[in-house]
Amino acid sequence: MSELASDNTESIALRLDDVGVSVDLPRPANPGDQVQGVPYRPVEFRDDDLPTALERAASWLRHTQNWLGEPVDVIAIHLDYDDREGRPYYDVKLLCNDEDLAGAPIALREHLGRTTDV
């Protein structure tokens, strides 16, 4: 069970399976087809100037790669816009692996380092 928050501070209960999709979602009929569990999350950069948003995204990727000690797993880059008054126009999203953002590769290296030192 998960909750979806809306703008008016009400929450809606969702019945999700282990993959994070609705338990009522029709599944593909062929056993070779599937709804995949994709552990990716968007990292967003918004600006009225697209090159600036892209430069900030690139800077974040460099810093995160240095912190992580390996390249960040980015599956997609999504570009959108928001033409509502007072909002940054460009919306650049990097779809990044959850485990990378949680620091799992760092924890794994530290764990392996401790077990080989024994």
Image (spheres, helix red, strand yellow):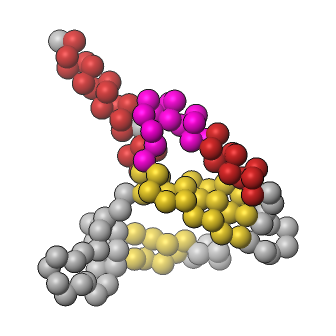
Residue at the image position 76 percent from the left and 50 percent from the top: 52
Indicate whether 48 appears above or below 69.
Answer: below
Residue 83: image location, x then y, percent:
78, 74
72 and 38: which one is in front? 72
Return the residue found at the far front: 51
Give the magenta part as a residue range.
60-73
Q: In what quadrant of the picture does the N terminus appear? A: bottom left
Q: In what quadrant of the picture does the C terminus appear? A: top left
**In-image side of 12 versus 52 (left or right):** left
Residue 45: image location, x then y, percent:
67, 54
Q: In which quarter of the image is residue 60?
A: top right
Residue 19: image location, x then y, percent:
30, 67
**In-image side of 12 versus 34 (left or right):** right
Residue 104: image location, x then y, percent:
36, 38
Residue at the image position 63 percent from the left and 48 percent from the top: 57
Return the residue found at the far top: 118
Q: In which quarter of the image is residue 36?
A: bottom left
| Number of marks | 0
95 and 101: which one is in front? 95
Asked if the stretch drawn in magenta spans residue 72, the answer is yes
Dominant SS type (magenta): helix
